[in-house]
Image (cartoon, rainbow, N blue to C red):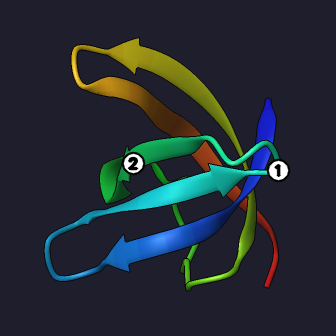
Amino acid sequence: MLTGKIKHLERSKGWGFIETEDEEDYFFNVSNVRPGQNLRLGDLVKFDFRQSQRGPSAINILKIKS
C-alpha cells in the first residue's frame, strides 16, 4: 500500500487526487473509498493503485489521519 494526502477533492462530481510524498498524483473515484470514510483535503490515506489508460488510479482508499 502507498501513503499520501488528499490534494484535490470534487465531492459533487465524485472524484479527486491523492499526492504521495514523492509528489506523484493518483486519481480516485469516491466509489474506491472504503465504506464509512469521509475524506477532506489534507487527510492522510493509505491506498492501493492500478494503472489505467489515463494514468495511475487509487483504489481501496483508507483514511489514516485527518
Earlier along the polypeptide chain: callout 2 or callout 1?
1
| Residue 56, placed above or below residue 40 | above
Rendered residue at 53%/46% (across/down)? 25
| Residue 59, placed above or below residue 13 | above
Residue carrying label 2: 28
Label annotation for residue 21: 1
Can you give x and y, in whole percent of width and height, for residue 58 in the image?
50, 38
Rendered residue at 56%/25% (across/down)? 49
- The amino acid type of the residue labelled 2 equals Phe
- Disc 2 + disc 1, Cβ < 8 Å: no
* Other residues around mark 2 within 10 Å, as few (<14) / some (14–19) / many (≥20): many
Can you give x and y, in whole percent of width and height, for residue 10 in the image?
27, 77
The answer to which image quadrant residue 6 occupies is bottom right
- The amino acid type of the residue labelled 1 equals Glu
SS category of the residue bearing label 2: strand
User: Which residue is farthest front?
Assistant: 23
Can you give x and y, in whole percent of width and height, for residue 53 in the image?
22, 14
